[in-house]
Image: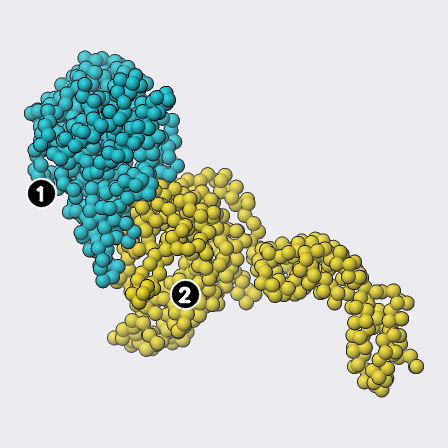
Chain colours: A yellow, B cyan
Amino acid sequence: MTMGNARRSSATTIRRDFSAFEPVIGLEVHAQLLTRSKMFCGCDARYADAPPNTHVCAICSGMPGSLPAINRHAVEEAIGAALALHCNVALFTKFDRKNYPYPDIPKGYQISQYDAPLGAGGWLDYRLNGVTERCGMVRVHLEEDTGKSIHTSIDGRSVSLVDYNRSGIALLEIVSEPELQSPEAAREYFSTLRQILMYLGVCDGKMQEGSLRADVNVSLREPGGPFGTKVEIKNLNSFRSVEHALRYEIERQRGVLASGGVLEQETRGWSERTEETVSQRTKEYAHDYRYFPEPDLPPLTFSIEVLDGIRAHLPELPLARAQRLEADYGLGAEVADVITLEQALADVYEDAVKSAPVASPRVVANWVTGDFLRLLNDRALAARQSPIHGSKIGELVSLVEDGTISGASAKRVLEQMIESGESPILIVERENLAQISDKAALEQLADQVLAENADLVRTYRSGKTKVFQALVGKAMAASNQRANPVSLRAIMERKLAQPL
Amino acid sequence: MELNYLSVSKAHALLLSRQISAVELTQAALARIDDIDPLLNAFLLTTADLALCQAEEADCAIARGEGGPLTGIPMALKDILSTTGVETTCGSRILSGYVPAYNAFVVDRLHEAGAVLLGKTNMDEFAMGSSTENSAFGPVRNPWNVEKVPGGSSGGSAAAVAAGEALFALGTDTGGSIRQPAALTGTVGLKPTYGRVSRFGVVAFASSLDQVGPITRSVTDAALVLNAIAGRDPRDSTSVDLPVPDYTLHVNEGVRGMKLGVPVEYFAEGMDPNLERVVRSAIDVYRGLGAEIRDISLPHSPFALSTYYIISPAEAMANLARYDGVRYGLSVPGEDIWEMYARTREEGFGREVKRRILLGAYALSAGYYDAYYVKAQKVRTLVRADFEGAFSEVDAVLAPTTPSTAFSLGEKTSDPLQMYLSDMYTVPVNIAGNCALSMPVGFSDDLPVGLQVVGKAFDEATILRVARALEAELGICELHPALEAA
């Protein structure tokens, strides 16, 4: 295990309690915007499974004489995201060149934003252990993604290759204030941010494909004291790696300080394999990016009306929606969080509630978060891919609530609905699943089951009444789960209590 | 009749009346190139087969009655303009062998207009220079005196037009690279207003200053070419969506009643007195033509050159970062990527280009940015404001294009500052963004003298009209250098 570039400090006269030092964490998230074309050229931005260098043109491969042109759609998406994060959206913004040489930066500079970002300030609310926390935003800006360097070997010779399919993809950089206090908070912040971007429809949130990735900054300080030396961990592409890398790094820094060492400001990488952070670049080798305004692109100006127009079209965001569901439908916070995890799931829920006026919204919530979600998960479907509309679930719950079908039947109906996309009524009628509540029919069913299971009846009457459940089960099965269980139980109890 | 010395407008008339064919015209130009270019070195590459092909097509178009003003007109393009399938080197070793997969906007426009491509012209490497001696492929010689430079960086284009190798050419002008060589070769060179012509496909030197324009042997020809290349291009976000007038429409209407400003700062000490005499007598001609001549002041113009040597290297530093040997052009292997970069750029770039990359990197470095780049941008605003103020009083500004006539080959190569000073009167216009042209107005010691006419932003029509009035009076464009094949 590497303990970084710690050097022994000569001035450790005061003993301090390093275990009480608290972490200070900030996140820099890069989100690929869901646009049809790239940020500055017309290339198709959907390159996920394409062979290398097939989504490239003169512009995104940096050919001499090519010029960028701004993708309006990306700007609008970025403004929407900035507004959703409560940023001040600049009425004047511009692009800058960030100069650094690397083969996956085909122009030798990246078009980014430096001193006039699209959005500044703002905040994001997230829930940690049921408590709503707020993290401030530093800035939100637009830039272009880089290409991808691939280090491999061909015929035993090690080579470096570069794929420009990703080069020029519209990228949103979202920088938080260093206000997150634990790896768990960082994880929840990141996951809520992802959820918001997906609600906005501006990012697909596919972290394994690199659509969303995070760099984290972390330092330790005495409670209430000044910030310590910060370390940046680059390119984390899962919630788990954010949390684990931070845990590791916090302990590493604690260890360095506790042993009297000095932390160096540096960039570290996270190894998924060894589960540790590894030094990549120290401050003395930090780049001087030589930012200057991008002369090929005129500054962008927006009117208040344009911003208001975009703001007016923002969807309700996850936390607000969860809180509304709690208030309107009496849901618990945990259930509301599950329902709002995906925008489409919340839509399903609310559509179901609307079409089930007889049912309690909490009962509907049980169906949606229970059987419905399980059936989707079994089929590896996201809520937005659901084959049935929420109103159908509402209809189904109504059928249970008004006694038309039993809960057990309803589970079978729901499964069929998901298979075929059919209405619950249709399935209930075709499969003859309507619940039997007719007294005479239930009497007859009970008599039949008791007669066929004389030994169980004897057992019951001998005092072992717990076999009652088995008898009811047999009766339910005999009715093809259609018998009204409440009525049936009453009838069977009465009959068993009667002398032979 | 010397076909290769026809003006564009005259050649057009002869083509339409079928007195000459585009093929004959093209053959005449190609013959002239064969004859004289081994001496001048104006062309880096000729496209004879392509040219004859295009000429045949032009003849067909004319026969169908579809001939426009440039149909069948043989032209040369500065090698900074991307041409599909035709090597484009920008005068640099680092781009030798680079064949673009696309045409610059202006090249497409000229093809659509039916112009015939003769070849690509020599230039200072990446347009950095004022003598065309910074070409990696040898210097160009001035057709009026082959011991002299033709100016630069569009020296190949200017020499080709002056020597009758092409009927017109395109150049680019970042700090005077069209006007200065035009002045030194006795041709007409027009730098349009920044944003008037698309830069798409023009290999970038300094993006906020670069502009493409024509080099011709007459003012009307410059108007005709500008008609073809001006206009909005969605691929260049700095190109402007303003209507493009027919620049020939009012070109002959004279200057009677116009107010023409003469800035005191543009007749600085150290100016060649003969050249000053020629320029002043040209200005006097305007009085006779009914224009009012006013002394004006552009007080910040003397600071333009130092501003230029902050802004242009800064932009160039970034623009030239892509030449790394990874995708195209020269690539020199190394132990690792950094060594490959270093070797490729060490071998690929010439001294002046390296000097400017270093200047730019320095000016933008942490801690120096405010003192250099930010300050330069502030001065730029002042230079621009000077011109705006002037144009509230006058219709156009008259000034010498250069402080001296063509200098000798090798005279300034060892002293970059002396070389930079030859652009002192052209650079302020790039800094301000306005349009300007240079036209021949006489000779000093048998070398051409250029007069610069500067106009309001997007008012090319006025400077063409001002220039045409003097041209009609002087008849200079009928004179050609007495040049013999080596």
Between B193 and A44, the residue placed more toward the observer is A44
> Which structural element holds mark 1?
loop
Q: Which mark is residue A24?
A: 2
Residue B287 appears in which quarter of the rendering? top left
Classify residue B20 as left or right of residue A203: left
The residue depicted at 51 percent of the width and 59 percent of the height is: A192
Quadrant containing the N terminus of chain B in the rendered view: top left
Residue A343: x, y in percent? Answer: 58, 55
The residue depicted at 61 percent of the width and 65 percent of the height is: A378
Residue B55 appears in which quarter of the rendering? top left
What amino acid is found at the position of numbered circle 1 in the picture? Ser
Classify residue B91 as left or right of residue A36: left
Question: In the rendered image, is residue A27 in sight?
Answer: no
Q: Which residue is mark 1?
A: B414
What amino acid is found at the position of numbered circle 2 in the picture? Val
The residue depicted at 56 percent of the width and 65 percent of the height is: A130
